[in-house]
């Protein structure tokens, strides 16, 4: 039925517009019908078929699953249908994923030009190291002159480069082998524990999982559900295996008499402050508000760290490229000076 997958931006804008229409009092089916006129013919056909499913009683998150929407967006819809806050959840979820997509696009743009420069520099490096420097070296030997530091550095780096590339290739194969033979067979919880242990990237994963968990719990509690009922909804969420496993384990811990905040400390893919927020929210009776504000804090912190990382990556690449070019320039220029002195 589905010929072409929706881009993440199209998915987010679609859900955001539905959320805006729902906030104005539109029923869900009418909101979707209103958006049909703004879409291309292929997507009109897809949504018309999905509207038929919706009228037959299928939940909206299953309709979006047929359209192959992003699983995080489907999760937002799934939980929104449980607590009833469709308008806010659709808009919040779409805005969060739009920001995430925007950050990835920024990262791609920041890396494209430096990577192009690295490619050109690598070609120049091979030319200098393989063709020009050997001629200078043989000339130095015939004239009893010592090679300068930069000539030696470029030569050593050129000799090491094949081994370095081989090591990177072997590392890639090793990671690929580990993923297919071990990693993907682990439980979702164990996978996320491994992911957050990755240097630098782990911090971003932790903030994202904490934000998503806390905002969904806050919506469900604000909708009148108890913590146990909210976790039951997590447990029944087949579209997100991580939160399904998490709901099962958290409910099992509660049955044993453990407190929710004490159980959450055991999961390294959540921020440690989450347990304190839950404890404080249970004391003052405003758990839903405390979790909602904490989820916003995590989202803002995620954006700040992403911006900071993006601003750091590009200059580092430029410095590396600059040093390599200057070294090649001096490796070629200084021998010429030596030859002039020899004459």
Image (spheres, grey):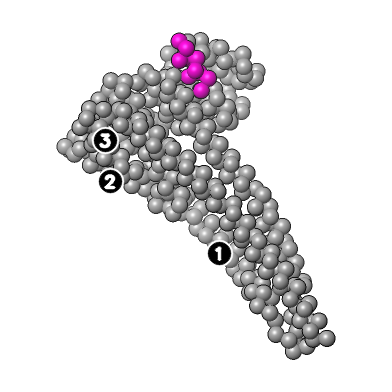
Q: CA distance from mark 1 to mark 3?
A: 46 Å
Q: Which residue is found at the position 78% from the left and 88% from the top?
A: 143
Q: Which residue is mark 2?
A: 266
Residue 79 seen: yes
Q: How many marks?
A: 3
Q: Is residue 86 magenta?
A: no
- Horizontal side, residue 166 vs residue 231: left or right: right
Q: Mark 3: few, some, or many residues within 10 Å (few <14, many ≥20)? A: many
Q: Looking at the picture, how far across and down is residue 174, in whole percent?
A: 50, 58
Residue 230 seen: no
Q: Earlier in the sequence, mark 2 or mark 3?
A: 2
Q: Which residue is mark 3?
A: 278
* Relative height, residue 192 to residue 25 (above, below): below
SS majority, magenta: helix
Q: Looking at the picture, how far across and down is residue 133, in whole percent?
A: 74, 75
Q: 240 or 39: which is nearer to us?
A: 39
* Magenta-colored span: 16-25
Q: Which residue is mark 1?
A: 167
* Relative height, residue 332 to residue 342 (above, below): above
Q: Earlier in the sequence, mark 2 or mark 1?
A: 1
Instruction: Point out the image quarter for the N terminus.
Output: top right
Q: Which residue is found at the position 69% from the left and 75% from the top?
A: 151
Tag nearer the camera, 2 or 1: 2
């Amino acid at each position: 039925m589905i010929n072409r997958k929706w881009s993440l931006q199209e998915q987010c804008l679609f859900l955001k517009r539905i959320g805006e229409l729902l906030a104005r009092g539109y029923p869900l089916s009418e909101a979707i019908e209103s958006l049909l006129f703004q879409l291309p013919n292929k997507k009109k056909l897809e949504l018309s078929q999905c509207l038929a499913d919706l009228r037959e009683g299928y939940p909206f998150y299953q309709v979006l699953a047929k359209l192959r929407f992003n699983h995080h967006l489907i999760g937002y819809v799934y939980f929104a249908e449980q607590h009833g806050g469709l308008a806010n959840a659709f808009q919040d979820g779409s805005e969060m994923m739009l920001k995430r997509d925007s950050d990835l696009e920024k990262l791609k743009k920041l890396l494209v030009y430096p990577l192009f420069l690295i490619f050109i520099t690598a070609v120049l490096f091979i030319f200098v190291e393989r063709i020009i420097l050997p001629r200078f070296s043989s000339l130095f030997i015939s004239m009893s002159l010592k090679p300068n530091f930069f000539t030696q550095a470029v030569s050593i780096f050129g000799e090491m480069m094949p081994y370095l590339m081989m090591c990177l290739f072997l590392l890639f194969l090793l990671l690929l082998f580990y993923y297919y033979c071990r990693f993907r067979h682990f439980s979702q919880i164990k996978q996320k524990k491994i992911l957050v242990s990755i240097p630098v990237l782990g911090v971003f994963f932790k903030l994202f999982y904490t934000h998503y968990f806390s905002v969904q719990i806050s919506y469900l509690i604000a909708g009148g559900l108890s913590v146990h009922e909210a976790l039951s909804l997590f447990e029944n969420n087949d579209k997100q295996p991580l939160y399904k496993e998490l709901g099962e384990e958290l409910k099992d811990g509660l049955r044993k008499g453990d407190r929710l905040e004490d159980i959450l400390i055991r999961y390294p893919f959540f921020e440690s402050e989450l347990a304190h927020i839950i404890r404080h929210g249970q004391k003052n009776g405003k758990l839903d508000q405390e979790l909602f504000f904490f989820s916003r804090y995590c989202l803002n912190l995620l954006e700040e760290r992403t911006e900071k990382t993006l601003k750091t990556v590009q200059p580092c690449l430029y410095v590396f490229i600059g040093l390599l070019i200057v070294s090649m320039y001096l490796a070629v220029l200084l021998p010429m000076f030596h030859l002039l002195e020899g004459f």
